[in-house]
Amino acid sequence: MPEKILIVDDESAPRAALEMLLRREGYEVRDASNGEAALAECAAFRPDLILLDILMPGIDGFEVCRRIKATPETRLTPVVLITGLFETEDRIKGINAGADDFLSKPIDLNELLARTRSLLRLKQYTDELENAEGVLFSLARSIEARDPYTRGHCARLAEMSAQLGGRLGVSGEDIKALRRAGIVHDIGKVAVPDSILLKPGPLTYEEIIQMRKHAAVGESICSPLKTFGIVLPIIRHHHEKYDGSGYPDNLQGKDIPLTARILQLADVFDALTTDRPYKTAIPCETALLMMDAEAERGWWDRELYAAFREMIQEARNHPEEEPSRKSANNTGI
Ligand SMILES: [Fe+2]
């Protein structure tokens, strides 16, 4: 299938010239003569590359670029900004808007083709990565779907963890990692048979051992994906305890990665406040009292737990902001 390029320019002559050249090279090309039309084409045509003139009436190229990069479906589509003359200020503005490359008018056609090929190659790699991530997320969702009690757990966990991370001022990268980990943290349960995963009664010692393997198995499932580098420690360590009594590595205190400690609090709280095969949901207040006692016992990082508690209390005072708690989960082990 030919790669798709969108040309955006309010002047018809340069637009037509570029269109002819790129069609001759075998690309599928569409054009737009203003910012609004460009955004509509982005949604409908889903281009692999956008050549975007900056100076246009209405929404200018900077703003179009900013909106493309702010939309989850198009944020990874490369954008080349084109203008008569690039002042340093314009380049900075372009970089801030998320542009991937710049071309000056009059356009050198060989340069245009070389950059087009290089950016399309990059887009292909990104798509492959996205596909691999997509497969992992689908697998995680299929595991969630095996157990009627876990539906919605991953999405709630991703949201709660990211919120707590945000309150604690962790980096944007870590917040992204928390969202991903929220979805895939229990992916290792693919190796746990239904007879254990859905058992309504207490597990035997052997079953507990089997269940506990899910943390390390999950890490190894996700490890081939380079973009999951900072997600892996969260997956591996989301069942460690602050006093060293957790698993799989009996890590203690601040040796447990901060992101794993964040996700873990959300995981435990969600497990307590939703139905399980072996118990019904506990009210939020009671769950917090139980977690208070566990923090006292040394299971949780007390400082972190205080911030988590505050967040949950605030959400209870503003229930419209609280993540949906209509379904449940089985992550107690
Ligand atoms: Fe888990």
Image (cartoon, helix red, strand yellow):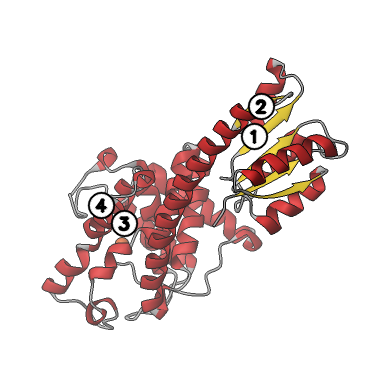
Q: Residue drawn 67% across and 28% down?
A: 94
Q: Is mark 1 within 8 Å of ligand 1?
A: no
Q: Would you say the residues marked 2 and 4 are in contact, meaning their CB atoms lie under 8 Å apart? A: no
Q: Would you say the residues marked 4 and 1 are in contact, meaning their CB atoms lie under 8 Å apart? A: no
Reading the chain from its start, which is encountered first: label 2 or label 3? 2
The answer to whether any part of residue 260 appears in the image is yes
Reading the chain from its start, which is encountered first: label 4 or label 1? 1
- Amino acid type, mark 4: Glu
Classify 10 Å Cα crowding around label 1: few (below 14), some (14-19), many (20 and above). many
Q: Residue drawn 36% across and 54% down?
A: 264
- Amino acid type, mark 3: Glu
For label 4, the residue is 240
The answer to whether any part of residue 69 appears in the image is no
Q: Is mark 3 within 8 Å of ligand 1?
A: no
Reading the chain from its start, which is encountered first: label 1 or label 2? 1
Could you say which disc has been placed on residue 216 in the image? none
Counting from the top left corner in percent of width and height, residue 156 is at 49, 62
Element type where label 2 sits in the image: strand
Element type where label 3 sits in the image: helix
Reading the chain from its start, which is encountered first: label 2 or label 4? 2
Distance from Cα at disc 4 to Cα at disc 3: 13 Å
Could you say which disc has been placed on residue 103 in the image? 2
Q: Residue furthest right?
A: 57
Counting from the top left corner in percent of width and height, residue 147 is at 37, 78
Element type where label 1 sits in the image: strand
Q: Quadrant of the C terminus?
A: bottom left
For label 3, the residue is 294
Classify 10 Å Cα crowding around label 4: few (below 14), some (14-19), many (20 and above). many
Q: Quadrant of the N terminus?
A: bottom right
4 or 3: mark nearer the eye: 4
For label 1, the residue is 80
